[in-house]
Image (tube, rainbow, N blue to C red):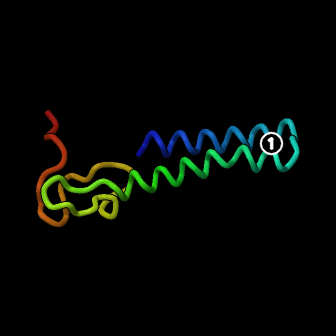
Amino acid sequence: MVSLFVGTWAYILSVVGVDVLVKPPATVVQWALVPALILVVAAGFVQFGVRCPSCGYRLGRQSRLVVPEQCRSCGVPLRRPEA
């Protein structure tokens, strides 16, 4: 999720930068932003599609961009303990 988030913002900022510097036609900018919309929709599917391996609870509602420490529903740990 973090990669999708950073990649989407980098793409959007690059399109805006090109728009400011080069001033292409508005339709070119609009079509250039379509992949950003696709990335946002894909990120939503990834975020809200991940489920707890034990109980099936959707983990996307529990945390943003990262895997939570444990499942809110059943309490199963989802991350390895740090050394």
**Which residue lies at the image location 63% right of the left edge and 40% below the top edge?**
11
- Furthest residue toward bottom: 73
Instruction: Report whether 44 appears left or right of 22.
Output: left
- Furthest residue toward top: 83
Instruction: Report whether 37 appears left or right of 17.
Output: left
Q: Measuring from the top left, give residue 21's x and y in whole percent.
A: 83, 37
- Other residues around mark 1 within 10 Å, as few (<14) / some (14–19) / many (≥20): some
Determine whether 65 is above or below 56 in the image: above
**Which residue lies at the image location 75% right of the left edge and 39% below the top edge?**
17
Quadrant (top left/top right/bottom left/bottom right) for the C terminus: top left
Instruction: Report whether 81 appears left or right of 67.
Output: left
Q: Measuring from the top left, give residue 71's x and y in whole percent.
A: 18, 59
**Which residue lies at the image location 19% right of the left edge and 64% below the top edge?**
72
What amino acid is at disc 1? Asp
Q: Nearer the viewer, residue 4 or 53?
A: 53
Element type at mark 1: helix
Residue 35 placement: quadrant: top right
Q: How many marks?
A: 1
**Which residue lies at the image location 53% right of the left edge and 52% below the top edge?**
40
Q: Measuring from the top left, give residue 38's x and y in whole percent.
A: 57, 49
Residue marked by disc 1:
19
Q: Measuring from the top left, give residue 23's x and y in whole percent.
A: 87, 41
Q: Nearer the viewer, residue 51 or 14?
A: 51
Q: Nearer the viewer, residue 67 or 47?
A: 47
